[in-house]
Every structure is written in C-alpha cells, then in structure tokens.
Image (spheres, rainbow, N blue to C red):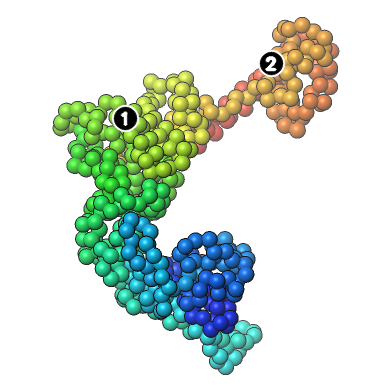
Amino acid sequence: MQVPKEVKLIIEKLEKAGGFEAFVVGGCIRDFLRGAESEDWDVATNAKPEEIQKVFPKSFYENKFLTVTVQTGSKNPKLKEIEITTYRSEAKYSDKRHPDEIKFAKTIEEDLARRDFTVNAMAMEIRKILSIEPTPLSQIYGKTAGGVYPGKKLEIKIVDPFNGQQDLKNKIIRAVGSPEERFSEDALRMMRAARFAVVLGEGWQVETNTAKAIKNNAVWIQAISKERIRDELMKIIMSGRAAEGIELLRKLGLLKYIILELEEGYGILQNKHHIYDCYEHSLKSLDYAARKNFNKCVRMAALLHDVAKPRCKRGEGQDATFYGHEIVSAKMTAQILNRLKFSKRDIEKIVKLVRYHLFYYNTEEVGESSVRRLVRQVDPENMEELLQVRMADRIGSGVPKAEPYKLRHLKYIVEKVSRDPISVKMLKVNGKDVMEILKIQPGPMIGQILDVLLGYVLSDPKKNKKDFLEKEIKKLGKLPEKKLQKLAQKARGERDKIETKKDEMTKKKYWVT
C-alpha cells in the first residue's frame, strides 16, 4: 500500500509552512498496516485551525471540532477533500454524544488517547525524504531495464502508544484506556465495536473487558440519535458478515435497544416447516442475502420478513401456526424503519417486500392473471427483489435449494406478463390516421392495414416513421380487398412467430418448459 500523494503533500506543506507537526491518523493507519484500501485519509497537527487555513486557502472550517477540510483538487473522489484536525483533548460528555468542551492538546499522544479503539489510535509520521545514491534500474530489474531509480524514499514511523499494532495482529477490538470512559464519551462506540469486529474480516473479537463494559452500559445507546444508529446498523447489514454482526449486537446487549422486535424471536420455536427458531431463521435469511450481495432493501426485508411471528404464534410444537404474520410483519417493519429514520422510499419498498414475501405460486394452480395482480401490488420494479427475499426465506428455513423449479417458472411468467406485447399500438400512426387519410368509416380494413404496417416495422424498426407509414397507408388503401386480407393474415402469422420465439427464449433463460 502507498500513502497517497495528496496526503504527503499536505504534510509537507504543514511542516514547511511553519514548522508544524503533522501525522496521518485513525482508521487509515489500521487499513494501511492491513494492506487494505482506506476510505478516508485524515491528518492531525499541532497547527490551529486558522493557521491551517493560511497554509491551505482552498479549505473550509464550519464545525466546533477543530477540523479544517482541505480541497485537494484530486481526481480521486476519496481524496478530493482531506480533513486536518488540530490535536485535541475532550472533557466530560454529559449527554453521551457531544463533548461539553474541546481543548487543544499539546502532543499527538494526547490526541490519540481520546480515540475509541487501539487499532484506530495509531498515527503515522512521514519523515523527510531520505537521499540515497541513484541506482540503474538494470541492477534492480535485470539487464533489459532502462533508466535510473532516483534514489529517494520515505521513512515512515508508526506512533502507537496503546499497542494497536499488537491488537491488529491478534484481531482484537479493545477500547483505548478505560472502556467505560470511552463509551460514556460517545455511546455509539459500543455499536462501532460490533461493526469493526465483523467488517475487518474473519476471526476478529471484542476484547473481554471492552465487551463487559458494553453489556454493563448498553442502555446508553438510547441517548444516540436514531440517524446515527441507523447509519451504523446499515454498515453492519451491508457487510459480508451481516448476520454475525446482528448476533454480536444481541450478545452485547445492544440489539434490544435498536430492534427489540427482532430479539423477541430468540428461542421462539416454529413448526414442521422450519428447523430454526424465529430469530435464527431471520439471521440465516440475512446471511444468504449478504452472501449473494443483495442490496440493502432486500437485506433488511430478509431480516425483518418474519418479525411478527412471535406475536402471531398460535399453538406449540410441529403444528404451530402464524396466520397473517406477513401482514403484521409489514406493519411492524414500517414502525421499526420509521423509528430508525429510514427514507420514505426505502420504507415503502422494504414494507412491500415483507408484506408480499409469502406469495403462493404453483405452476398448475396459479394463472397469469394472478401473477399480474402480484406484479401490480409489488410494482414491476420490485419483483426481482421480492424473489430474492423469497430465496433468502427458503434458505433461512433450512431447505437446500434457494430457487426451485416453480420459482424459476414464476420468474418466467413475471417476465412474460411484464413484457409489452407486440401490438399495433407500437406504430407511429393509428386507426384515426387511416380513416382520415383514406376518407373511410370504421371497419375491418383499418385493422388489416395496421397489421400490414406493423409487419413492415417488425422487419425494419427504422420504418416506424409517420411520414413513411402515411405513404404506405395510401398505397394499401388502393389494394383489392382480398389481397389486403392476405397481406394482413401473413403479417399476423409473422407476428405470432416472433411472439413464440420470444417466449421460447424466455423459457430457456429460466430453464423451464
């Protein structure tokens, strides 16, 4: 991994402009040491905000947190703006969200001490470029290589006062200093601990004392704005290990303060159609959606599609029932998503996916009219996602196949009924135009002429122009009745062949007969 040139230039300018200290800090150091691409590159310095702005005129300072945003002009979207923050130390957090007071810190070590986890509390010092003797590239890469290595390199030093590198090696999420203090400063850090444990890869764990502090203080998460909770939740949901993240939230005692309704399903057994309890079923469904890289709406619907089952359960054992649970689940999903401040558009889509996930389809029993009704209810644009939720639901139920024959057959029927039929309505002229041009009254001749014109357009779409079609109407109007009838019959036959061919291709696409 390389330190981006934009970051190196910022540090160089700060050091040269006034002899300021400057370090690369935070999660980008963690990612750099892991060999992973970083989303953000941040800089910390002992320069005050007004001093930073003098060095970088193309910048803005619109917050109370001593952070100046520098506009670099980079073509890389991730590097167009880089945040530079003055060393700071923060006082008491009365509301578990915002510091009562922010003070300047004197050293980078003091600044790192206020950060959340050891793997995020490291800084990188990029020292001056060291000069070494220029070396011919042929000595490095072989005789055929031309040119000279300029003989310059960067010396990098990692500032790591809390042994973050060791925790990085051991895949441990550990709070900096006292976990209680860190979480009292910002209670969202408890969710971030769970998020880092799943997004950083396999094998990561929350350190014992850090986990204990989260369990003891999980109630503090209620002080956090629902928007921040939603954003952190979605980072977990959109990770490859989404189901593990939700389960970790439950184990840490946080889930009941985020989606209590989901936790209600823990230990609630289902019936003979399911091998997992309600909660496990939801997680298995989410896991499949994550492994298939389905979008956020499908993942949320997979997680919440059966959220009402504990409240709808009647009876016990193999014959327990959950009548109407999809309707109640849709209402509860709307309440949950509204509470978490999801967008209106996302709420509408996810609620529809939950409401109709239990659609019935059997190739011998359900006709095209019923499928058309389902498509209207869900909206054509949501049908693919509804089928994805159904596949996640199936795998979550313990069945081996996500997409059996009848589900593939449904996909075929959905595409068939959603496809615009070949029709004279596609033409740039209509029956009224035919009557006006030929000065005739309504009758079979009009339909015959339109059928012939459609045949022309199907063979060459470029002919679907009003001026061309109007000329052809005049020619067809002069033909004997029987000849026009034969031309129309032939055109309808060709149209039927095209429709049949399209249908065969669609069947082949979904492997159905």
- Most extreme residue toward the bottom is 133
Task: Rate crowding at label 1 as few (under 14), some (14 to 19) or many (20 or more) other CA atoms within 10 Å.
Answer: many
The quadrant where residue 89 appears:
bottom left
Amino acid marked by disc 2: Gln
Dot 1 or dot 2: first in sequence order is 1
Comparing labels 1 and 2, the label whose residue is closer to the camera: 1
Write down the residue under mark 1.
328
Write down the residue under mark 2.
489
Q: Is residue 248 left or right of residue 46?
A: left
Could you tell me residue 157's position as x and y percent?
A: 43, 82
Q: Secondary structure at mark 1?
A: helix
Instruction: Name the residue: 61% across, 83% down.
Output: 145
Could you tell me residue 439's position as x and y percent?
A: 82, 9
Task: Rate crowding at label 2 as few (under 14), some (14 to 19) or many (20 or more) other CA atoms within 10 Å.
Answer: some
Q: Nearer the viewer, residue 11 or 384?
A: 11
Disc tally is: 2
Amino acid marked by disc 1: Val
The quadrant where residue 209 appears:
bottom left
Q: Is residue 171 left or right of residue 7?
A: left
Instruction: Name the residue: 32% across, 64% down.
Output: 92
Q: Secondary structure at mark 2?
A: helix
Could you tell me residue 373's position as x and y percent?
A: 46, 22
- Most extreme residue toward the front is 101
- Where 107 sits versus 248, above or below? below
- Residue 271 visible, this angle: yes
Instruction: Name the residue: 31% across, 46% down.
Output: 258
* Distance of label 1 from label 2 (alpha carbons): 54 Å
Could you tell me residue 352's position as x and y percent?
A: 42, 32
